[in-house]
Amino acid sequence: MIRPRVIPALLLRGQGLVKTVKFKEPKYLGDPINIVRIFNDKEVDELVLLDITATPENRGPQFDLLKNITSEAFIPLAYGGGIRSMNDVRKLLSIGIEKLIMNTSAVENPSLIRETADHAGSQAAVVSIDVKKGLLGKYEVFTHCGQKKTWLDPVKHAVEMEKMGAGEIIINSIDRDGTMQGYDVELVRKVADSVQVPVVACGGAGNLFDVSEVIKQGHASAAAAGSIFVFQGPLRGVLISYPTPKELKEFI
């Protein structure tokens, strides 16, 4: 049996990495290249890197910075943020990005998912779905880093993205982001049980029990997390960490 992946999710804001709470209150973590080097040494499964201001600022990926990051990353790197065209896709692939994560463009231009899958394979076309619960408890999809409501249902959107060629779905709870209160297992299970492609849970991990729960009870193929890999202690001091293979085997 293949061990489920446990993936550090890093948020790029300008030239530095940050960690947010419910997509707000960004706390500076440090230089992305230095942090990627640390994760190299810790032999993580892969890294997710999301430029959280690219779309709100109506700009594309920071190709020069990403080129410097990929030159230091000895592990598979997935990137999202400001991808709008096949030109962006080709440039990112050429500098070593292995997976293209699309969120806003998946809603506004879903044919880009198909084109990416046709060009680079479905494994390279990843759709990230940011979800928030409404006042009546209904799950709703948001774009533009959680700023724009789409009225889409996350399960129906995930199914549609799979039909368009997405090889992986990242389901991210805005309500749980950075809270360390555990994943939204119900949300992840609804999506995971509705599609055939791997689903990566994101948003809310507070410890490895949460990771284990979302994989076993939420049926996720992988779990992405931020806070548990970048913070230490109740005051959330910045310290980059990653569980040992023995610890992962114990929980997952």
Image (cartoon, helix red, strand yellow):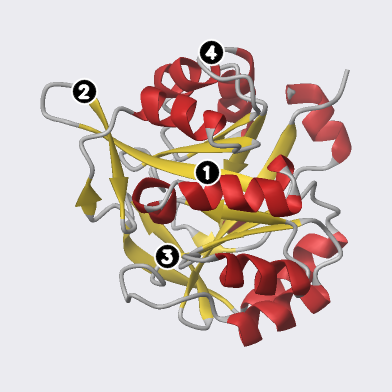
* Percent position of residue 88, x then y: 58, 71
Rendered position, 230 above or below 139: below
* Percent position of residue 6, x then y: 70, 39
Real-space Cα separation, disc 4 to disc 2, in angstroms: 18 Å
* Percent position of residue 201, x then y: 54, 33
Q: Amino acid at mark 3?
A: Ile
Real-space Cα separation, disc 1 to disc 4, in angstroms: 16 Å
Q: Look at mark 2 in the image and give the residue it sits on.
A: 138
Judge whether residue 225 can be spotted in this image: no
Real-space Cα separation, disc 2 to disc 3, in angstroms: 25 Å
**Secondary structure of residue under mark 3:** loop
**Lower sequence index among marks 4 and 2:** 2
Q: Amino acid at mark 2?
A: Lys
Badge 4 vs badge 2, beta-carbon distance below 8 Å: no
Q: Look at mark 1 in the image and give the residue it sits on.
A: 127
* Percent position of residue 230, x then y: 59, 58
Left or right of 64: which side holds 56?
left
**Lower sequence index among marks 3 and 1:** 3
* Residue 52: assigned label: 3
Instruction: Say which quadrant the C terminus sits in.
Output: top right
Q: Look at mark 4 in the image and give the residue it sits on.
A: 193
Q: Residue at x 44, y 46 (%)?
A: 110
